[in-house]
Amino acid sequence: MQLRPFSLLIICVLHCLYFSATAQPTRVREDFDRNWTFNLGNVSRAEDASFNDASWRKLNLPHDWSIELPFDSTSPTGTGGGALRGGLGWYRKTFTLPATDKGKNIFIDFDGVYCNSEVFINGHSLGVRPNGYISFRYDLTPYLKFGNEKNVIAVKVDNSQQPNSRWYSGSGIYRNVWLVKTNSIYVDNWGTYINTPSVSSTRATVNITTTLSGTGGYCDVTTAILNKEGKAVAVQTQKNLHVGALQTTRQVFSLQTPVLWSIENPYLYKAVTKVISNGKTVDEYTTPFGIRSYQFDVDKGFFLNGKKVKIVGVCNHHDLGCLGTAINTRALERQLQIMKGMGINGIRTSHNPPAPELLDLCDKMGFIVMDEAFDMWKRSKSKYDYSNDFDEWYKKDLKDQILRDRNHPSVFIWSVGNEIQEQWAKEGDTAGTAYLREMQQIVRSLDDRPTVTANNEVRSMNRLLQSGINELVGYNYHHGDWPPDSVTQKWGRKPFIVTESVSALQTRGHYDMPSDSMRIWPQRWDLPVANANPDLTCSAYENCFTPWGSSHEATLKMFLKYESISGMYVWTGFDYIGEPTPYPWPARSSYFGIVDLAGFPKDAYYLYQSLFTTQNMLHLFPHWNWQPGQVVDMWAYYNNADEVELFINGKSQGVKRKTGDELHVMWRVTYEQGRVEAVSRKDGKVIASKTIKTAGAPAKIVLQADRSAIQANGKDLSFVTVKVVDKDGNLVPDAANNIQFTIAGAGVIAGVDNGSQTSMESFKASERKTFNGLCLAVVQSTGKPGSIKLQAKSAGLAPATIDIIAK
Ligand code: GAL
């Protein structure tokens, strides 16, 4: 955007006016993650301030205790829960507050505790919260001591009643905790609401509603909108507001030539709200936001800033592989970067409110988020799940989720439920629709984004769709029912979105031939999978998926065919712990991911890349280590090219072109040792090529860090990929070598993995077997600056070392 001199002058004046009033920061939000103690198991009187926890383990949050436990076939969480136990744990933290904090309001904010938490301060119970995914605040003020006197926070976390989840939930204070200190008048928790009801390239209306809290007195509220460079582009002041209990004030801005938030340019503004009392700034509260317009159209799908965008999204669960559910911003960012790399532009937070950091990243990186509330309402899916708490808590939980998340420009859709059992209510049973109506009212009272339910019943007897309450019609699966006529005939002229699709099953690097032989697993839940692979693998060709799902390609063909489909969220971007459909123990993590649990792409990754990214790409698979004379199906995904030619040891196997709606090309060839090569051509010129050579015996280890410099903050991570290669550097496609790590300097190993769905090795170890040639070590900074040296060795292989710097 080009700014005219006059606009620049206005910006400078506003900036000076605004910052001349700036005093010292008036609100303090402290990271409260460090120096907790932890005990797994119940202990009586652990909430008492005088309780002696000297023998408890010392740790920093976020923390997931389940990921540290061994896989256990008798765990009541079942393999659905990752065969990792839950249990009951206590956390305590002792802290002091300076005498100067006396008179302040002091709150503790939990981003998420799984689950059934009860929080105590100096022996007083502050409350309970059953929902393991919701963020909540308690006011500590009345119970605190200052100066040299100690305060004790104790948190009881009860994840002992199992099963309570269909996937791995993790256990503990697995998200961040904050201590917030304010003066007597302050912006309330989640106290701003910013929306942009009218947006064009020349002008945008920005409404900012601010809720003040506190006791008595009058104040002024000044809100400045800062651009990316931190310059104030608009300022408004509201004078003489009386603050009783809660007071709401609304400011309406009109911005000239706004920079719009989009997937390609996720531009963020900041609203900085200052509360001024008796001439002094008593609070300052910052809300990042974006300016964008959007529309869901029944015929033409989704539009962002007037431009048609097809939402190509993925569903993800909240675990971070070997880190468990303990939130880590870099681990989340890496996941999103991997997704961007395949052309994904949407994230569904299946099936619960996410960590706030995920939405911050989606805002900054440009994703279209479907923010989901519940996996069940009153009708349960597992015995001890949230259905038991639903009646008492759903209104508050939903309200808090919307209040927390509604300023994120990346959020476009509220999903109030996934595959809700009330879909199937008998005729005349209106309980489900009554819940839905109530939830719709809650959302509408707080925000204007559309709501949806993710339905796996798409026949006209679906009570939730019948009710017509949601603005969007959402289907899980049933790709045969996506044509616009079929949707509108049943539900009227409402915009349509595929809330969940695919559920293909794949093991990275494993191929069942011929590639057109289909495995639709499981045929029945009560029987073992017929013709199952004894090693519990699923084929990474497009030939293994669930009966309710469909292959990636079949799904994409329908998705691309109809303009009316606003978008879809594929099940799933990443493998996750738990739900190892179609296999029983010892399978313990899912096969659904386009990327495995360690973050290594399966071949389907490149299918999406060929469709939804623009740089020239060509992906050839599988590997080239077979039995002499064996018939092998070689597949290629490519883009931007007219044709692809395959060569085996220099001999052409023919030229292939995708025709009609085909999404790949294939050659059925006879294996001979050596090299296989594909070249893609555009207008007769080679634009990409790929060569795979027959690998010899495992000879050495290769280490590759995703980042060789990390922050020395005790949280940042470097993900180190470990490859086992032959003497010439070719990846050995079935290598299963046990790699031992040693680490020295300013780093520790936070986790190890290899993406196998059946490995019984611990994620928290300093060794890992490679699976199909690869494994992963996650290196975390200790908090001190300095160099980190990671060494990897294995019997019979040349070792490797990598240096990472923590700054
Ligand atoms: C869906 C469900 C997901 C997951 C998936 C596996 O029906 O919504 O949570 O269970 O099936 O295919």
Image (cartoon, rainbow, N blue to C red):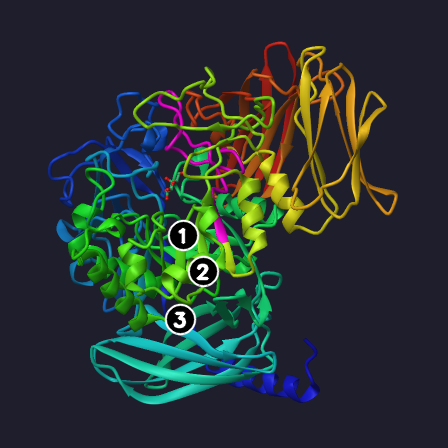
Quarter of the displayed picture in which ligand 1 can be seen = top left
Q: Residue at x 26, y 80 (%)?
A: 247
Q: N-terminal of the two: label 2 or label 1?
A: 1
Give the structural element (helix, strand or loop) at label 2: strand
Residue 475 got which mark? 1
Q: Amino acid at mark 3?
A: Tyr
Q: N-terminal of the two: label 3 or label 2?
A: 3
Report the residue marked by disc 2: 496
Does 399 sit above or below residue 543? below
Front: mark 1 or 3: 1
Q: N-terminal of the two: label 1 or label 3?
A: 3
Relative to 453, 656 lies left or right: right
Q: Residue at x 37, y 66 (%)?
A: 471
Residue segment shown in magenta: 568-597
Q: Are marks 2 and 1 in contact (CB under 8 Å)?
A: yes
Q: Are marks 1 and 3 in contact (CB under 8 Å)?
A: no
**Residue 359 versus residue 619: which sits nearer the camera?**
619
**Residue 144 versus residue 700: which sits nearer the camera?**
700
Task: Inspect this view and state whether residue 608 appears.
Answer: yes
Residue 594 is covered by the magenta coloring: yes
Residue 285 got which mark? 3
Q: Amino acid at mark 2?
A: Phe
Indicate the position of residue 596 as horizontal and vertical percent values. 52, 33
Crowd class of label 1 (few under 14; some 14 to 19; many from 20; radius 10 Å)? many
**Residue 494 versus residue 282: which sits nearer the camera?**
494
Q: Amino acid at mark 1?
A: Tyr
Task: Inspect this view and state whether residue 712 appears.
Answer: no
